[in-house]
Image (spheres, helix red, strand yellow):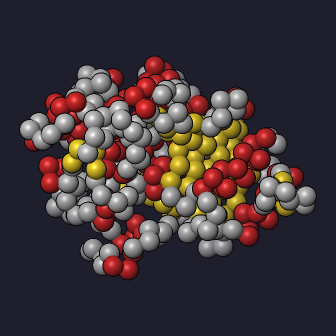
Amino acid sequence: MFHSRITMLIPNINSYKSFGKVSIPRSSDQFCFFEAKDRNILGEKLLVRTSQNDGNPISLSQYLEDGPTVAFSIIRNDSVLYEYYADKYDESSIVSSFSVSKAWVGITLGCAIQDGFIKSAEDSIVTYLPELRNKKGMNKIKIRHLMNHISGLKFGTLSFMYYKRNLCNVKNYVHSVEPPGTNFAYNNGNTQLVSIIIERACGKKFQEYFAERVWTRIGSESEMSWSVDNKKSNTIKSFCCMSGLNRDFAKLGKLMLQKGKWNGKEIFSESWYNTMIKWDLKENSAWDNEFGWWMGPKDYGYYYAAGLWGQYVIVYPKKNIIITRFARLNIERSTQVHDRLMMVMDQL
């Protein structure tokens, strides 16, 4: 049953409980990360500076305990080296990912291209959304423009899509304000359109295709829920609103470390992997955002999926490391959280 949105003007880690949802089943062949011995020791050894000129850094464990983090993991070579859960949370607790889900959409797009449902990310969006064909400027917009937030489309505020009740009726809420490739303008609506395009191309709901091609193939230990706009259409909010286990989200990192393969079987191609993590300024794309992924500094070579309030799945290929972090409402700016996590990575 849908609850009032009025009490939910500020999205939080428990907001998923107030929306309708669909459940995506777990894998029949579950994968469990190994657990390193004495894995709590690392939390005392790793240090974090809480300000730029802080001469007395605190332990990672203290930093996590003092803040809004509810789940945190450091994984290397499939072993959990360190893990933290806040009070009333443990490895069986459900966490919300917010915009981390955009990375899953990028992966699923690659699957749809590989399966031949979509020819290319260079396809015009009106090929799959013909109701937009006669709207100004729509025929020039490519799927890539949507994924990289350079579509020139306007959808309202960032929260507009979060509370919208009829996401599949795209003609009523999609408007072009400038030619594609003019500016980078991060907006949830871009990702939402990509998932609807995938639905149209595949002939099935996005969540069904995602379950078949990705979620059930990567050893997920628990079902995952995805919020929907309403129970009649069951259109998922693909730009956010996935909820599941911390360690299952870490499998997003493992899949990327393996460049699209799982147990030797290809989920998506290595060429698509390279496309997603390529630094590209083409048509005014942001240098650090490609197909749902954010890029870290070039010298580090890591990349990450990120969501509201500092939700992270960080993939660091040079050190074969995955870091996950999920949090409540966060007074720290995301850039501050990111800086702290870079300090941790430097010490590993």
Q: Which one is nearer the viewer's eye here, 278 or 234?
A: 278
Note whether residue 127 is visible: yes
Q: Is residue 281 above or below residue 207?
A: above
At horizontal 55% and vertical 69% (from top left) the residue drawn is 329
Q: Residue pushed farthest right?
A: 55
Q: Position of residue 20 (x, y in %)?
A: 29, 66
Q: Is residue 235 above or below residue 117?
A: below
Q: Is residue 199 left or right of residue 280?
A: left
At horizontal 48% and vertical 28% (from top left) the residue drawn is 281
Give the number of callouts: 0
Q: Position of residue 88 (x, y in %)?
A: 61, 73
At horizontal 15% and vertical 54% (from top left) the residue drawn is 172
Q: Which one is nearer the viewer's eye here, 272 or 301?
A: 301
Residue 28 picture quarter: top left
Q: Is residue 270 above or below residue 47?
A: above
Residue 63 picture quarter: bottom right
Q: Residue pushed farthest top?
A: 271
* Quadrant, the C terminus: top right
Q: Is residue 97 left or right of residue 48?
A: left
* Quadrant, the N terminus: bottom left
At horizontal 82% and vertical 42% (from top left) the residue drawn is 347
Residue 66 picture quarter: bottom right
Q: Which one is nearer the viewer's eye here, 251 or 183?
A: 183
Q: Position of residue 128 (x, y in %)?
A: 17, 34
Note whether residue 80 is visible: no
